[in-house]
Amino acid sequence: MQNNAPTVQGELERVLWTLFREPVRLTGAGRTDAGVHALHFIAHFDTLRADLDTDPTLVAKLNSMLPREIVIFRIYAVEPGTHARFYAISRTYHYRIATKKNPFTNDLAFHFYRQLDVEKMNEAAAILLEYDDFTSFAKLHGEAKTNICNLMEAKWYDDEKNGELRFEIKANRFLRNMVRAIVGTLIDVGLGKYPPHEINRIILERDRSAAGASAPPQGLYLVRVEYPNCQSIL
């Protein structure tokens, strides 16, 4: 919610309130910086309505009331106490780099045309999996009580045919600005500013200034949030 600008949460609460005729307060699985995209996102709210699983028109009604930037895929009832943020067991992000000029992805990827050594970037990315303290990639003075994260995947994919590099990273949780800081640092490795093994030093210093600059937000996508015993809706 922002007092001076429209937000995803604000628009969703507005249409839910309008349709349900009761105050609705959403709690999301997390938050993203301005300019970052979400292809898959989960939020929960409390309601007195009992037809969430039985009204086949509910999703269509809500989508017709929402701005074109927001779409609801599914709405359903869960057990009382279920929490969209604290119950999540993993989150997956993708970061897209356009390696060739493409006017259709100006706001949907980071356009970067210098040659990158993807093999060395993947060497450095693999080292990330050996650690769990990511203070060096955390936004300074953040609200997180701990900078410990269980990283499960971190790998670059080169789609040369379509002129795109894609970084896929999965963890139980992420710190504010963490993925963009990691991507910026790995880009430095790909440019030859330092060898892959320097990632060890950067992590062990536990100092944000030791890592590279954060990559721009337009290339980052939240693509999946997973929960125990639940299948993804995508």
Image (spheres, helix red, strand yellow):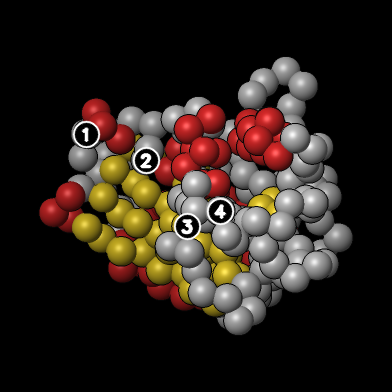
Q: Which residue is mark 4?
A: 55
Pinpoint residue 38: horizontal percent, then vertical percent.
Answer: 51, 47
Quick one: 74 or 168, which is closer to the camera? 74
Q: Is residue 212 above or below residue 102?
A: below
Quick one: 63 or 157, which is closer to the camera? 63
- In which quadrant will I find the N terminus? top right
Compare marks 2 and 3 and give the one earlier in the sequence.
2
Compare marks 4 and 2 and give the one earlier in the sequence.
4
Q: Which residue is mark 2?
A: 109
Task: Tell me the number on the disc at residue 101.
Answer: 1
Pinpoint residue 145: horizontal percent, then vertical percent.
Answer: 86, 60
| Label 4 packing within 10 angstroms: few (<14), some (14-19), many (20+) | few
Q: Is residue 63 above or below residue 93?
A: above
Compare marks 1 and 2 and give the one earlier in the sequence.
1
Q: Secondary structure at mark 2?
A: loop
Compare marks 4 and 3 and give the one earlier in the sequence.
4
